[in-house]
Amino acid sequence: MSYVVLARRYRPQTFSEIVGQDHIVQIITNAINTSRIHHAFLFTGARGTGKTTSARLLAKALNCINGPTAEPCNVCQSCTDITDGKSVDVLEIDGATNTGVDNVRALREDIRYMPSFCRYRIVIIDEVHMLTTASFNALLKTLEEPPAHVIFIFATTEPQKIPATILSRVQRFDFHRVETQVLADHLTSVISRENFQIEPDAARLIAIQGEGSVRDSLSIMDQVLAQHPSDDVIKTPEVRRILGITDRETLINIVKHVLERNTPEILTKVHELFLNGIDIGNLTKSLVRQFRDFLIIRSIPDSGNLTDLSNEEKDLIIKITKPYSVEHIHHLLLRLFSSSEYISRSYSPKTALEMVLVDMCIAEPLMPLKEIISAIKELPAQPTYIPAGATSATTPVSITAEDRKSSQASSNKKRTEAAPASISNEISRQPAVPTVKPTVEEPVSTRRKVDKKESVEPTKPEPFSVIPDFLKQNKAPQSPVSETPAFSSETPSGTVRLLGMDDWLNIIGEIKKIQNSLGFQLEEAKFSSSEVQSGILDIHLALDPSAEFLKQQLSGRLKTINELVSSITGFPVRVELSTHEEIGSQTGFAPGKPVKSARDVLMQKAAVRRKQVEETIRDNPYVRTLLDDFQGELLKFNVTENDSEE
């Protein structure tokens, strides 16, 4: 007779033999004892945790001659046929190979017939998530209202791929990964029944490699038994050698050397492990797992069951990690973890692992930015220079922290007091020359780098948009910039007053709300002047001689423009279009006076606002420190509409 692997030979035959799934066993047992059996079940969970085994046990429990019972006899014909997999009333279907609609239709036809021998017809579909959407849809009605003699049991490792319409019609049970110690005890029991002995640490090591899967752990045990003499105890070093696993002491030492940045020891140890036949892929996984244990122990000294470490190992790790921050250990773990896939796919995994470990040794410990700035401010002295005109015998004096703060406050005050004469006024700002005192030098960190020529703007930006209601209330605009005089607020009610550039900007803003395209066209025209003739407010707009298309567009819409402006201002308005050459002759406007379009003014105001926001950012103490002490540079920042209104 051929050899039967441990996973098949020791498959549980009763619910009490299922390992690590007590919560599911309890629910199913209670349901059978109270005759509250659902017509469809869904068993989900990781591989090797007992999903298919539990489905078969449920089939035996329902069809046993003594049943339905939570403890099938495993002696009657129904139990033995189900155990041997030859019962005609228990259909085991592989969802991966029976994915089509035709397979589901054949199944629906088959389950209409009564059981041949058993009490129920059980349909077990393994890897049910492999069915197509059409197959699931064909199964919906039958699954919701199956014949009284049919029970469905689905098993899958990926429940997220199952449609919600199916999930709503089944009773779901989630199988958990088996705990390491429970799995190790089960392996010890199996080995004893095989007439072998195993050290507890060796069984625990196999359970760790099995990652909570009973089937995977038993398969690893088969591999160990195949190379083990029958008259000796299975020991931990033997298991490590057979599976190519690095012992924990070596892993702890490698992590310790990485934290200490001891590159020679790390490279030597990796080379020794490689010569001893250790698999580099397994070594990388073991190092990731060990770094994870270091991070947990450093974060939570009393980690409980979060790690598989002994108390002695935990004490050693606490001692090793004490000088290092959690952030630094996390940073190193992140580097190793993100590189693990690259190492496994590399044509030279050993070289890839060595490169990653050396990179981790080079990595500097992380330090919060606030601590860096605080440390810089606490420095006792800064480099000094000898003032011009002083002799070489003059003793330079270091700048203290208080002097540095005072100098920086003085520099900020000078920048704040600067004010322009108008929006477009630009003056040359030369770098400030520090005042040289006999014994105190202004530190380099407080000297501000400026361009040879820089625009100076108002300390507070103009409002980008204001309420245009003041036009109807005969109030003068509040902006300090006005290119034409306006009547004061004492002007009698009903009197037409002149408009300035700010008024024109507000009018265009209101027009945009009504006809956006027309507002953009008016922005291109340059506001020339406004005057009152016979109670009508004339608004003169100047156009470039080359802007023939714009002039045609605006000329054809003059009636609409007049109506919109009149409704906004409350005054009778007549808008006239002229070219630059016609301005002086038609309006009496001084030819030498600059004429601007609304778009030019808006762009100018936006530039002013952006410059002021930049100054505000640069005046922030943290930003100032980064720019001065670290020779930083402000590359990019965003200005929103709200920034201009605050």
Image (spheres, helix red, strand yellow):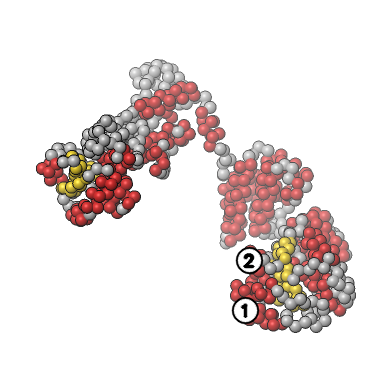
> Label 2 neighbourhood size at 10 Å, few (<14), some (14-19), many (20+)?
few
Q: Position of residue 531 (x, y in %)?
A: 18, 39
The quarter of the image holding the N terminus is bottom right
Q: Position of residue 505 (x, y in %)?
A: 29, 43
The quarter of the image holding the C terminus is top left
Determine whether 618 is above or below 17 in the image: above
Q: Secondary structure at mark 2?
A: helix
Q: Position of residue 244 (x, y in %)?
A: 71, 59
Amino acid carrying label 2: it is Ala
Quarter-wise, where is residue 325 in the image? Answer: top right
Residue in front for this viewpoint, 301 or 546:
546
Q: Secondary structure at mark 1?
A: helix
Residue at 66%, 75% (x, y): give it: 141
Q: Is residue 370 left or right of residue 588?
A: right
Q: Which residue is labeled 2 in the image?
A: 164
Mark earlier in primary sequence (2, 1)? 1
Residue 554 in view of the camera: no
Residue farthest front in this picture: 493
Residue at 74%, 71% (x, y): give it: 39
Q: Which mark lies nearer to you, 2 or 1?
A: 2
Q: Which residue is labeled 1 in the image?
A: 101
Amino acid carrying label 1: it is Val
Residue at 65%, 52% (x, y): give it: 288
Q: Is residue 33 left or right of residue 439?
A: right
Residue at 28%, 36% (x, y): give it: 474
Quarter-wise, where is residue 494 in the image? Answer: top left
Determine whether 491 is above or below 355 in the image: above
Residue in front for this viewpoint, 304 or 283:
304
Q: Is residue 524 left or right of residue 1?
A: left
